[in-house]
Image (tube, coloured by chain):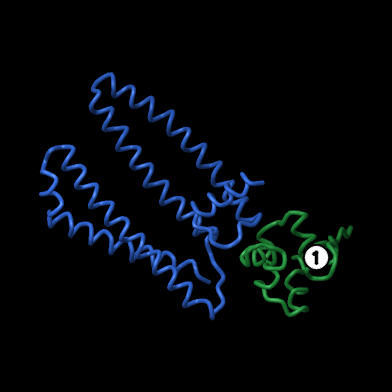
Amino acid sequence: MNRVREYRKDLNFTQMDLAQLVGVARQTINLIENDNYNPSLALCINIARALDTDLNTLFWEEINHEKQ
Amino acid sequence: MKNNKRANFLIKRFHGIEDVLDEYKESQVNRFGNIAFITLLSYLVLSTFIAYLIYLISLKWAFIFIITSNTLLWFISLCVGAWFVRLKQLDQLGVQSDDLPSVKQRYLKRAWGAGIGLGIGIYALNIILDVITGARPFYASIGNVSYIITALFVGVVFGGCTYYWYLRKLK
């Protein structure tokens, strides 16, 4: 799960606010937050800029490769 | 760039997308377009072949087959397109509560327009068909009560359905 929702709420943005900032529809932000749509790199960068953070923080997921 | 704008305008108009045509919507519309193209091309090949086979027996029935199947396909395409747009929420419009009355008012006007347009269209079509087939003289067709009632009924029902359809866009 990405951290778009968490960062958006930290900045007190609604989905509509963020959508208008990055130039997409509110539904698209909702889909991204729920991991139902993989945004393009350009859109990811725009979202990261709008939320004043970077791509890694928003979208990078650590995978545990623990060996038994 | 200009062509792209025109294409976007056409796509938005065709699918009833009022909000921004962003990358998600564009990808969904493209996917739908590809599937529709493959389906329609297959239909074209198949229906032409069947029409040719029927033509070998009767020209009249080949003609009837083409008209009927094309009309059916047109109707089915319309329904599937509308269903897809609604399923993927492509036409959803986020409206602030302050703007809601004005948006509803705009939709009501559009629905009125659609209803009146279709009603007049049906009425004119009936008159044209009468004149072409020679079933009634022009002035008798114009005053035909059943045509007027049909046009009114179709217009009101279609206008009402259109308004309901528009309201379902709002979120």
Above or below A30: residue B78: above
Would residue A24 appear left or right of B155 to someone viewing this image? right
Would residue B123 appear left or right of A16 to someone viewing this image? left
Give me the residue at 29% from left, 63% from top.
B157
Image location (x, y in percent) of residue B141: 14, 49
Q: Of residues B26 and B87, which is closer to you in this image? A: B26
Say which chain is green. A
Query: Which residue is most to the front?
Result: B139
Task: Tell me which amino acid carries mark 1.
Answer: Ala
Image location (x, y in percent) of residue A26: 63, 67
Image location (x, y in percent) of residue B36: 50, 42
- The residue to which callout 1 is attached is A48
Image location (x, y in percent) of residue A9: 74, 78
Say which chain is blue. B
Would residue B156 appear left or right of A52 to someone viewing this image? left
Query: Which residue is most to the top?
Result: B56
Q: Quadrant of residue B143?
A: bottom left
